[in-house]
Image: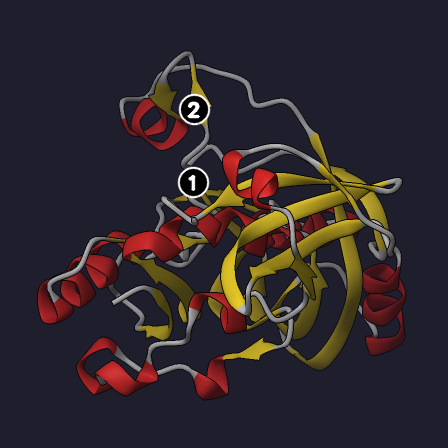
């Protein structure tokens, strides 16, 4: 059993707990791409057995979320499960002003990750240090907002849809939106709708998954162009000459998927091969 499951992670469970359930159910070893916080729900891509080798390629794809932001209060985790650490008055806001503010986030911007995150600082997780009350600083990093759209605005809550680059914290995006609106805020709700063109509508809860829901490794990497090679030296880790558009490729040898290569110029190099591809 080698491939991907499109899993619907339920609210109240960690991504790791969801993976543990799947591993027990199918008696496999797995991994996932893109942690979803316990309060969040939606699409979680899980690779099992050999497919875990290819999970990192999903980081290339943008992610789409539905979120509800509560204005006027900020929690230490920037979500509904945290402790309130700050309260500020919410200024008088019009729908037009909120929409204008959201549009200002489209493109690249520098985002400071949440203190409660899985980022490592000197070998330790940031959330572990935050729980122990330690003082530390997280450096801002560039993220990209492809699209952000206001769906509803009522009272002190706004619901928005956003498509963002991998590595973007929507909790931090909510914090930054609130700050630009002249107040503070936290996320009350978060749902991952899509990773690339993979939709949460096609995902299933662990208890609903069946063996036939397993997506073959090469099909899961749908956005990569398929290329056929004819030289065995590629399978031994050596580059080969190849003409085509640059980027990652799903590579086949004698009609069989053997791994991922990357094309630069007219040289195709192995990037991640299956074991014993010959």
Q: Is residue 157 above or below residue 17?
A: below
Q: Is 116 situated left or right of 63 in this image?
A: left
Can you see residue 37?
no
- Residue shown at 43%/49% (left/top)? 278
Name the colouring of the figure.
secondary structure
Residue 161 found in image quarter: bottom right
- Residue beneath disc 1: 76
- Residue shown at 64%/47% (left/top)? 231
Q: Which of 135 and 264 is in front in this view?
A: 264
Residue 128 found in image quarter: top left
Q: Where is residue 100 in the image (x, y as percent from the top left)?
A: 90, 66
Q: Nearer the viewer, residue 189 or 41?
A: 41
Q: In this view, does 207 lie above or below 185?
A: below
**Residues at marks 2 and 1, CA–CA distance in whole angstroms:** 18 Å
Give the quarter of the figure containing the N terminus.
Answer: bottom left
- Residue shown at 37%/44% (left/top)? 275
Q: Position of residue 199 (x, y in %)?
A: 54, 80
Q: Which of 193 and 175 is in front in this view?
A: 193
Q: Is 24 situated left or right of 218 in this image?
A: left
Q: Residues within 10 Å of mark 1 (few under 14, many from 20)?
A: some
User: Callout 2: helix, strand or loop?
Assistant: strand
Q: Is 87 situated left or right of 243 in this image?
A: left
Q: Is residue 147 above or below residue 213?
A: above
Q: Where is residue 251 in the image (x, y as percent from the top left)?
A: 61, 57
Q: Nearer the viewer, residue 34 or 268?
A: 268
Can you see residue 33?
yes
- Residue beneath disc 2: 120
> Counting residues from the N terminus, which is met first, the one under dot 2 or under dot 1?
1
Q: Where is residue 152 in the image (x, y as percent from the top left)?
A: 68, 83
Q: Is 108 situated left or right of 76 in this image?
A: right
């Amino acid at each position: 059993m080698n491939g991907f499951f499109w899993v619907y992670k339920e609210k109240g469970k960690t991504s790791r707990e969801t993976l543990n359930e799947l591993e027990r159910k199918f008696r496999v070893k797995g991994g996932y791409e893109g942690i979803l916080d316990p309060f969040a729900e939606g699409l979680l891509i899980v690779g099992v057995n050999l497919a875990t080798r290819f999970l990192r390629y999903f980081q290339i794809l943008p992610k789409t979320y539905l979120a509800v932001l509560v204005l006027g209060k900020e929690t230490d985790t920037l979500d509904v499960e945290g402790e309130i650490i700050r309260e500020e008055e919410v200024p008088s806001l019009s729908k037009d002003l909120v929409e204008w503010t959201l549009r200002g986030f489209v493109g690249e911007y520098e985002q400071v990750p949440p203190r409660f995150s899985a980022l490592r600082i000197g070998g330790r997780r940031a959330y572990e240090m935050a729980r122990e009350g330690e003082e530390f600083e997280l450096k801002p990093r560039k993220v990209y907002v492809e699209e952000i759209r206001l769906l509803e605005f009522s009272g002190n809550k706004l619901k928005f849809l956003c498509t963002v680059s991998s590595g973007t914290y929507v909790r931090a995006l909510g914090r930054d939106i609130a700050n630009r609106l002249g107040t503070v805020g936290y996320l009350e709700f978060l749902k991952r709708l899509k990773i690339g063109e993979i939709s949460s509508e096609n995902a299933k809860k662990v208890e609903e998954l069946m063996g036939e829901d397993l997506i073959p490794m090469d099909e899961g990497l749908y956005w990569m162009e398929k290329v056929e090679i004819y030289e065995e030296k590629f399978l031994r880790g050596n580059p080969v000459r190849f003409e085509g558009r640059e980027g990652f490729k799903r590579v086949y040898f004698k009609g069989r998927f053997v791994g991922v290569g990357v094309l630069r110029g007219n040289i195709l190099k192995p990037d991640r091969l299956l074991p014993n591809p010959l």
